Image (tube, helix red, strand yellow):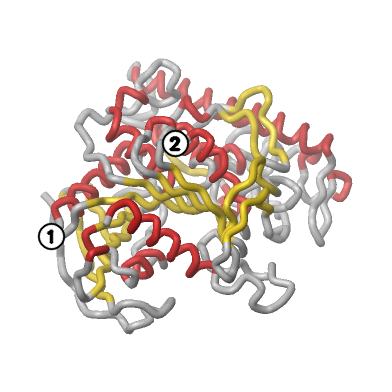
Amino acid sequence: MLKMNHVTGCPLRADGGYSKGLPIKDTYVQIGDGMRRVHGVLYEPVKFMAESRVGVIILHSDDDYSTFAIGPELAKRGFCALCGQVSDAEGGFDKKILDLGDTVNFLKKYEGIHKVILMGHSGGATLMSAYQSIAENGASVYQEARCLCRCTISESLTPADGVMLLDSNWGNGSMTLLSMDPAVVEEGNGMKLAPEFDLLSEKNGYSPEGCHYTEAFLKKYCEAQARRNNAVVKKALDRLTALEKGHGLFLDDEPFIVAGGAQFAPCNKLLPQDVRLAAHTKKAYDLMHADKTVTKEIVHCLRKSRPARRSTSLLESCLITTVRSFLSNRAVMAAGNYLIQEDGIEGIQWNDTYNCTPGNVRNISVPMLLMGMTGSYEYLASEIIYENASSEDKTICFSEGSGHNFFLQNGIETVPGQYGDPAKNVFDKAADWMRERFI
């Protein structure tokens, strides 16, 4: 059953804590029952208007997005926005997809809402794209023999009417690959590390002012990263086979630990440290400037180098999960040509899993908006997602100066006010895109 529990329901102050706009109200909601419940906040304009017929769902596959900025910002532009958290961030991917299904059904039945749009940010794009792919085509698209983990969902899912992917990363599986430390010598042990892969070695190209890793080091690092990643995936597949034969450590699942495998941002390797990597798009796209003018050009990243750190020996950088959860949420295979380059990433087998957004969007037909934030290295994922998207109505643009969470990226301005208020441009663009198609 769907359950809604009004707790606040009172208007926020006019500026909502972010920017001026319509007065809005926020309502706490619970969706689902039993062990599977989505907790969130529904943001709405106090006065119902034409835009309020469109409901936007904002969920992440791992994090709590209940207070994420874009919810109240879209409400102040007239839309209804439901921001929340999946019932089990550490659980299997299928459960998260079913959580999203309950949330879509909730908004579809909510009074006054005629259209439902999925908004995926960062790793949330993995969840949104996988859901829409299955809702449109059925789970069979992820049950083929080539799939690393076969989707177990048997029920029909309600498709959304559109998808917005804002500063999506390359998919949760891909981010685990990009975070995988190739220096680990013995699986499960974060203390035995090969010094040849040290990101803090000046010999390899490290500098406190900004890393310039040598071409030889980058090639060697990526080759080793791919080897270790694929070995970890194979180990998980072997354990799954044992589980299915009744030879696992437990009946249903078993622990799975990957030293130096946590995918949260401080653990990403190479990209944050060397700004020459993922530095520009391959093709020219629309770039939104501070004054709202738009130019079409090769889009360059504005990020600053983030210092590398030796974190693999710390438990916080260890991926602690289960065999089944790893395979559904985090596993992707790297091909022999895997390499991180100045204009993208080559050699990730996007189509062998449903935890990689570039593969998922090949199965989506509804209108799609992609936006990349130029203050963030993840911005470049928008290009490859756009290139793979099958939607006939697909839009891509980039926001100059925006950090990963849309607001101005600290430290990139050489002149105060150089990039204005890039977050406002992002929120306005999302609102205008929905008005053009769904009002």
The C terminus sits in image quarter = bottom left
Residue tagged by mark 2?
A: 355
Residue 416 lies, in percent from the top left, at: 68, 79
- The crowd level at tag 2 (other Cα within 10 Å; few <14, some 14-19, many 20+) is many
Helix or strand or loop: what does disc 2 sit on?
loop
Q: Does residue 336 appear to the left or right of 15 in the view shown?
A: right
Residue tagged by mark 1?
A: 111
Q: Looking at this view, is 105 or 91 the one in front? A: 105
Residue 314 lies, in percent from the top left, at: 61, 52
Residue at 68%, 59% (x, y): give it: 303
Q: Looking at this view, is 410 or 389 the one in front? A: 389
Helix or strand or loop: what does disc 1 sit on?
loop
Q: Are the residues tagged 2 and 1 within 8 Å (C-beta)?
A: no
Q: Is residue 425 above or below residue 193?
A: below
Q: Looking at this view, is 156 or 239 the one in front? A: 156
Q: Does residue 175 appear to the left or right of 219 in the view shown?
A: left
**Residue 368 in sight from this viewpoint:** yes
Q: Does residue 346 appear to the left or right of 16 in the view shown?
A: right
Q: Looking at this view, is 145 or 312 the one in front? A: 145
Amino acid tagged 1? Glu
Residue 283 lies, in percent from the top left, at: 64, 42
